[in-house]
Image (spheres, rainbow, N blue to C red):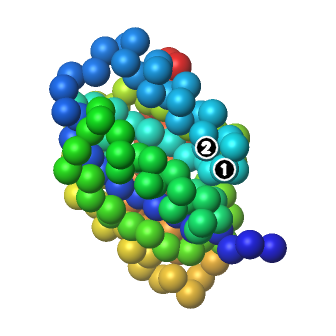
Amino acid sequence: MTPLHALVYQSQATRPLDASDLDILLLDARINNELANVTGVLLYGDHRFVQYLEGARPDLDQIYARITRASQHHRLEVLERDRIETRRFQRWHMGFSDAPQTVVQQLSQAQWQRDAPWLEDHVASSPGLLRLLTFWNEQAILSR
């Protein structure tokens, strides 16, 4: 079995994106992610993106290369790239949520390194991943 990896990045929108812009972006992402067997979520708030992706390393590299060429954003910063044991968002080729500015800011400033990388359970998750999972499970409204 191919090892799984996660990639988390943040970026700044090059201009304000409206619902139509986001729909086009999400359709493209969902198609390409499904073809590459990559899952994850995208949060957008205050003209900023935070995206968590998971899949096989070559597939993630392919998707991230596409992301870096996208004209909708710039100032990309990888927050974490690491091996993971299980997918956290296996049902989402690209889940999406409009997120409050405070959540996007917290995620972009969170520690994404796992506190105990030798443990293979939920307790070993990084503070950033725990914050993302909490927001997703309790507050995210999937409007698209």
Residue 24 in the image: above or below residue 77: above
Residue pointed to by mark 2: 33
- Classify residue 135 by image quadrant: top left
Residue 71 in the image: above or below residue 66: above
Query: Which kind of residue does numbered mark 1 sit on?
Result: Ala
Marks 2/1: CA–CA distance: 5 Å
Give the crowd class for mark 2: few <14, some 14-19, many >=20 residues within 10 Å.
many
Residue 49: image location, x then y, percent: 31, 40
Residue 81: image location, x then y, percent: 44, 69
* Residue contact at pointers 2 and 1, CB within 8 angstroms: yes
Q: Nearer the viewer, residue 58 or 20?
A: 58
Residue occupying image coordinates x 69% and y 43%: 35
Mark 2 lies on a secondary structure that is helix
Residue 33: image location, x then y, percent: 61, 43
Query: Which kind of residue does numbered mark 2 sit on?
Result: Asn
Mark 1 lies on a secondary structure that is helix
Residue pointed to by mark 1: 36
- Classify residue 74 by image quadrant: top left
Q: Does residue 82 appear in this view?
A: yes
Picture disc at residue 23: none
- Left or right: residue 85 versus residue 13 is right
Q: Nearer the viewer, residue 43 or 64?
A: 64
- Image mark count: 2
Residue 3 in the image: above or below residue 133: below
Q: Nearer the viewer, residue 79 or 132?
A: 79
Residue occupying image coordinates x 46% and y 21%: 24
Which residue is outermost to the right?
A: 1
Q: Nearer the viewer, residue 75 or 113?
A: 75
- Classify residue 31 by image quadrant: top right
Quarter of the figure with the N terminus: bottom right
- Left or right: residue 109 versus residue 49 is left
Which residue is outermost to the bottom?
A: 118
